[in-house]
Amino acid sequence: MEKFDHRAAIKNIPHKPGIYQFWSESDELIYIGKAKNLKNRVTSYFNKDNYRINAKTRVLVSKIRRVTFTIVDTEIDAWLLENSLIKKHQPKYNILLKDDKTYPWIIIKNEPFPRIFWTRKIIKDGSTYFGPYASISMMHTILGMIKEIYPLRTCNLPLTQSNILAGKFRVCLEYQIGNCKGPCQAFQTDDDYDQNISEIKDILNGKTSAVIKRLKGQLDTSVAELNFELSHRLKRKYDLLDRYQSKSTIVNSSITDVDVFSIATDEKHAFVNYLKVMNGTVIQTQTLEMKKRLDETDEELLTIAIFEFRTRFNSTSREIIVPFDLDLSESGMRVNVPKLGEKRKLLDLSQKNVMFFKREKLEQYEKLNPELRTDRLLTQMMKDLRLNQLPRHIECFDNSNFQGKFPVSAIVVFKDAKPSKKDYRHFNVKTVEGPDDFATMEEAVFRRYRRMLEEEQPLPQLIVIDGGKGQLSSAMKSLKTLGIETQVTIIGIAKKLEEIYYPGDQYPMYLDKKSETLKIIQQLRDEAHRFGITFHRSKRNKATLATELENIPGVGRTTADKLLRHFKSVKKIKEASQEELSEVVNKSQLSALKNYFKNEKPRI
């Protein structure tokens, strides 16, 4: 492979704003970027001392064999040019912008007695377009409201004055049912129709309050003049518009023209929500998904999305609302990061939308690729529990006893955040007398990991102890005895307040009650308790039954255990035939069993 001389490639790049392009050995365009200062930005890729360059960027740099650039006047021109070139060429290492559909517009047709309908094609014929609308349902809601308030024509007849005066047309069913005033036969004047169109334009521009105010004035005048028929029509319009405004207005109408943006990211994706607000009304909204390629920062991603949205929706707002400061000084836009008030409510609304969209999208991806959910869960656990590696192997301990009798310990194992039941284990406590939960925990942990070390099995990344500081200290004592206390992370969970304890830390950590990390820890704890109590009950029941059999003359503990292992219960022993019993016991024991069950008193 030919070695790339980056010094020669960047020698003639100027200190000006513009876009740069990286090409591979096969002359494939692999990356497009923009910069305020082209020379500094391109040079930074080849600076060996730049610690901020990540692994993905190093791979990109290793593939560069040619650099080209284009100078522009301002940074905003660089943003726009970069955006259009990325869409056209879709380089391998650039952020992937998704959801690039052709969105519908509402059109007021440039013709006599204009029609209003929706379209996905923009034709430069003098017509007026409003949109685009990312929400089809919102667009149809607006069109339905307009149709209900304003009777407009829907036919495509050429309604010129000469054609109307010549009597070429007849009214249709729409006129008969009141959906049209019949301009085709001069039943409606140009001025009346144009007044309706003017009000509709105001509504589509978010100036619903102005239309309502005019209607209120007309309504008061018609009432004063006792024109009740006109008053009825105006009142109906007023009520419909007022109801529509109450649903669409979410903040003070003094917020006349702003763009609102918010962002949510994870390791591989970014989601940006956009709200267009006019006169307190959200008239456009959309959420964009972006796929990361080079671990871009939230600031970089949001800036790219802002220019993408403003280009897509032809926005000319001078103010944008964002969740953190951005350097957009050259763009002429005023950046606002509100802390309180109506604008903060708008930002909160945008953030709610983007979080919902993110959660919905990730759930879809995880259904198609379950391993994505596993990796996300483990990454979140590693972050929440301050681990230094993914907890792919987790073990949880729990103890059970009955008034100090029949003490047992149980261990459950989760691998990749799922139960691995074949690895579950029970421990019959051997060295502890009486109800000593701390000593029982110490024995179980010691025996478990001594055996794993002897068999050279891999240790878990995380150990969970069901209990507070006392049980955790006992478990930690065993790990220190074995010399592995620094090789694994161990935590305790106290059930009452779901407190997480770390060795040597007197203050507990509290996880969010809704966090997935806490849910997995609770699942581990509950599964260990279930598994342990099941074994404990089985052991206690067998011991009770064995004691009953030992009361039979000639039947000792060994024979009782042998009978229970073979027949599983006293009931089945009682129902067994002599031939079946003789397979387990000798003749004298058989006779003793027969006499015992024959003389046994019935239980009440």
Image: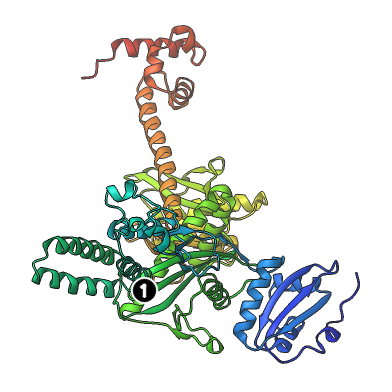
Residue furthest front in the image? 166
Residue 496: in sight, yes or no?
Answer: no
Foreground residue among 359 and 545: 359
How far from the left and from the top, in percent, is residue 460?
58, 56
Dividing the picture into quarters, in which one does residue 253 lie? bottom left
550 versus 210 height, above or below: above
478 versus 551 height, above or below: below
Residue furthest right in the image? 2
Residue pictured at 24% horizontal, 15% vertical: 602
The N terminus: image quadrant: bottom right
405 versus 456 height, above or below: above
Residue pictured at 45% horizontal, 78% vertical: 322
Foreground residue among 592 and 340: 340
The C terminus: image quadrant: top left
302 versus 482 height, above or below: below
Amino acid found under the numbered disc labelled 1: Leu
How far from the left and from the top, in percent, is residue 263?
49, 71
Q: Which residue is mark 1?
A: 346
How far from the left and from the top, in percent, is residue 503?
47, 67
Residue furthest bottom in the image? 15
* Left or right: 70, with 348 as reference point: right
Foreground residue among 601 and 128: 128
Residue 490: in sight, yes or no?
Answer: yes
At mark 1, the secondary structure is helix
